[in-house]
C-alpha cells in the first residue's frame, strides 16, 4: 500500500503519468488516428473544390500532389508515435510536443526544401524534381521522383526536430503542457484528434499550396498616374466632340447639296445652255 502511494506521489511530482506507455497504440489510440487521417483527407478534397474552376486540378494531378503529402505525414506520424514511447514520462505530452514542432519548424524546412528543388529544376533542367510539374501527359516517373524527394525532406525534418528535442528545457515544458487534463482518455483525444485536427487543416492547406503547380503567366497592364489618366480622359472627350462636329458638318453639307439639286430642274439647265450666244 505504501509503495503504491509512493509511486503515485512520484508520478504527480514528475507532472503525472496520465497516458500509459501503450496508450498511443491500443485500440482507442488507433481508432483516433484513423479518424484523424479520414478528416485530413476530406479537408484536401474540400480544398480542391474551393479552387477556381479555370484553375481546378484534375483528379489525377490532385492525387499526385496530395499523395506526396499523405505519405510524408504518415511517416512523420509513425515516427512520432515510436519516439513518444522512448522518452520517460507521459507519452502523450512527448507526442504533442513533437507534433507541434513538426507543424512549425518542420513546415519551414519543407518550404525551403521545395523552393530549393524548384530552383534547381529551373537552372539544371531537372523537370522531374519540379514539384507540381508532371509533364504532358502526366508522367508517373516524375511523381515517383518527387515522392522520394519529399520523403527525404521528411527525414531531414524529423532528424532536426529529434536533435532539438534533446535540450533540457523540454522536461519542464512537458510537465505543464497537458497538466490541466487528468482523464487519460480525454488527454489522448486531445493529443491524437482535437489538437492535430485543427493544426493539420492549416498545415495541409498551406503545404498543398507549396506542392501544387500555379500558372504564373499574367497580363501586366501599365499603371498610369491620376494626372495622366485625367489628361487622357480630356483628350478622349475633345476627340469625340471634334468627330461629332465633323459628322454634323458633313451631314449639313449633304443636305444643302441635295436641296440645290432638287431646285435645279434638268430642262432648265438645258434651256440655259441653249440660250447662250455662240461666239465665232
Image (cartoon, rainbow, N blue to C red):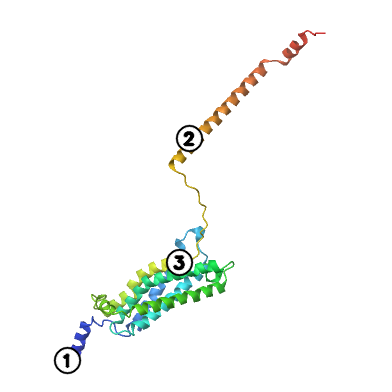
Judging by the rendered image, the residue that carries numbered circle 2 is 234
Q: Is residue 101 visible?
A: yes
- Image: 16 above or below 65: below
Q: Which mark is first along the chain, 3 or 1?
A: 1
- Residue at 62% x, 20% y: name it: 256
Q: How far across and down, in percent of the image, does residue 171 sit? A: 27, 80
The label number, if any, that marks residue 275 in the structure image: none
Give how far apart the Cα atoms at labels 1 and 2 are: 97 Å
Q: How far across and down, in percent of the image, does residue 55 sit? A: 50, 60
Judging by the rendered image, the residue that carries numbered circle 3 is 210
Which mark is nearer the camera, 1 or 3?
3
Q: Residue pushed farthest front?
A: 123
User: Is 229 displayed left or right of 270 in the figure?
Assistant: left
Which mark is nearer the camera, 2 or 3?
2
The quadrant of the image that shows the N terminus is bottom left
Q: Which mark is first along the chain, 3 or 2?
A: 3
Q: Secondary structure at mark 2?
A: helix
Q: Residue pushed farthest left?
A: 2
User: Is 242 displayed left or right of 198 in the figure?
Assistant: right
Callout 3 crowding tier (Cα within 10 Å): few <14, some 14–19, many ≥20: some
Image quadrant where residue 2 sits = bottom left
Number of numbered discs: 3
Judging by the rendered image, the residue that carries numbered circle 1 is 2
Callout 2 crowding tier (Cα within 10 Å): few <14, some 14–19, many ≥20: few
Q: Is residue 1 visible?
A: no
Q: How far across and down, in percent of the image, does residue 6 sit? A: 18, 89
Q: Secondary structure at mark 1?
A: helix
> Looking at the image, which is closer to me, 38 or 212?
212
Verify CB contact (< 8 Å) between mark 1 and mark 2: no
Amino acid at each position: 500500500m505504501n509503495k503504491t502511494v509512493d509511486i503515485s506521489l512520484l508520478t504527480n511530482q514528475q507532472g503525472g503519468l496520465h497516458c500509459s506507455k501503450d496508450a498511443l497504440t491500443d485500440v482507442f489510440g488507433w481508432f483516433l488516428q484513423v479518424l484523424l487521417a479520414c478528416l485530413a483527407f476530406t479537408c484536401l478534397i474540400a480544398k480542391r473544390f474551393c479552387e477556381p474552376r479555370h484553375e481546378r486540378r484534375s483528379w489525377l494531378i490532385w492525387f499526385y500532389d496530395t499523395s506526396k503529402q499523405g505519405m510524408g505525414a504518415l511517416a512523420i506520424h509513425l515516427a512520432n508515435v515510436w519516439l513518444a514511447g522512448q522518452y520517460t514520462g507521459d507519452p502523450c505530452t512527448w507526442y504533442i510536443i513533437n507534433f507541434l514542432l513538426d507543424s512549425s519548424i518542420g513546415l519551414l524546412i519543407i518550404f525551403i526544401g521545395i523552393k530549393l528543388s524548384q530552383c534547381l529544376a529551373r537552372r539544371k533542367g531537372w523537370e522531374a524534381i519540379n514539384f507540381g510539374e508532371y509533364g504532358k501527359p502526366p508522367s508517373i516517373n516524375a511523381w515517383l521522383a518527387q515522392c522520394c524527394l519529399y520523403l527525404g525532406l521528411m527525414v531531414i525534418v524529423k532528424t532536426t526536430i529529434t536533435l532539438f528535442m534533446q535540450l533540457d528545457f523540454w522536461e519542464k515544458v512537458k510537465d505543464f503542457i497537458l497538466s490541466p487534463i487528468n482523464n487519460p482518455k480525454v488527454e489522448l483525444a486531445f493529443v491524437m484528434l482535437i489538437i492535430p485536427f485543427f493544426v493539420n487543416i492549416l498545415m495541409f492547406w498551406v503545404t498543398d499550396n507549396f506542392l501544387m503547380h500555379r500558372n504564373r503567366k499574367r497580363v501586366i497592364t501599365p499603371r498610369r498616374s491620376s494626372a495622366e489618366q485625367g489628361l487622357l480622359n480630356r483628350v478622349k472627350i475633345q476627340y469625340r466632340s471634334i468627330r461629332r462636329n465633323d459628322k454634323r458638318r458633313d451631314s449639313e453639307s449633304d443636305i444643302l447639296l441635295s436641296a440645290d439639286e432638287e431646285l435645279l430642274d434638268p430642262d432648265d439647265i438645258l434651256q440655259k445652255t441653249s440660250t447662250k450666244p455662240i461666239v465665232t
